[in-house]
């Protein structure tokens, strides 16, 4: 892997997040290799920093699948430095819903991918039950990719048109 950065939240003794940090770049990391890195909170909160929580990933993890019932599954991709909860598919609205809380205090992107079932498949993104303007959706004939900006704090995301039933 090349040009790796570690992102972490900085917490005070009460568990409140007081900063988000990014490590120095690790230029190359070979399989099984361990390398040191450093990341420091902002000087203004340094004295209150008690612990860090990091977001990690496994490049060898199997694809994500969502059980749709009746022996059917949906393969999907979801990438973000965010807490994702209540992830589910609703057949009646042909939509996937989840709650997202980005770890960056300024908000950030959640990237979501699903297989493109046909050229006419259209998906719509809702944030807190409001349709998003300037939706960032791309299709390449095989995959639909969305980049959804999540503002600070917790928000409900709904993506409709998942199985092309909307």
Image (tube, rainbow, N blue to C red):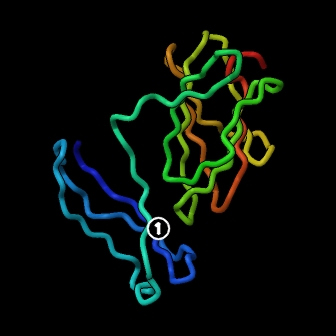
Residue that carries the numbered disc 1 in the rendered image: 9
Q: Residue at x 19, y 42 (%)?
A: 31
Q: Residue furthest front?
A: 71
Q: Quadrant of the C terminus?
A: top right
For residue 153, above or below residue 67: below
The one nearer the camera, 4 or 67, is 67
- Give how far across and how far down residue 63 sits, in percent: 46, 28
For residue 87, above or below residue 115: below
The one nearer the camera, 62 or 127, is 62
- From the viewer's perspective, tell me whether residue 113 is left or right of residue 67: left
Specify the quadrant of the image occupied by residue 102. bottom right
How dense is the environment of label 1, judged by Cα within 10 Å: few (below 14), some, or many (20 and up)?
Answer: many
- From the viewer's perspective, tell me whether residue 142 is left or right of residue 37: right
Specify the quadrant of the image occupied by residue 71. top right
- Give how far across and how far down residue 156 sits, in percent: 73, 48
For residue 166, above or below residue 40: above
Q: Residue at x 26, y 63 (%)?
A: 24
């Amino acid at each position: 892997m090349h040009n790796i950065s570690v992102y972490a939240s900085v917490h005070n003794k009460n568990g409140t997040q007081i900063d988000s940090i990014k490590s120095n770049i690790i230029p190359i990391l070979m399989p099984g290799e361990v390398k040191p890195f450093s990341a420091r909170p902002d000087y203004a909160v340094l004295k209150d920093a008690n612990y860090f929580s990091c977001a990690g990933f496994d490049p060898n993890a199997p694809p994500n699948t969502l059980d749709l019932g009746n022996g059917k599954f949906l393969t999907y991709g979801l990438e973000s430095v965010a807490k994702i909860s209540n992830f589910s598919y609703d057949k009646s609205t042909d939509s996937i819903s989840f709650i997202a809380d980005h770890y960056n205090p300024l908000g950030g992107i959640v990237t979501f991918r699903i297989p493109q079932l046909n050229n006419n498949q259209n998906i719509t993104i809702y944030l807190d039950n409001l349709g998003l303007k300037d939706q960032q959706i791309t299709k390449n004939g095989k995959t639909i990719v969305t980049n959804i900006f999540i503002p600070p704090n917790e928000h409900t995301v709904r993506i409709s048109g998942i199985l092309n039933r909307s």
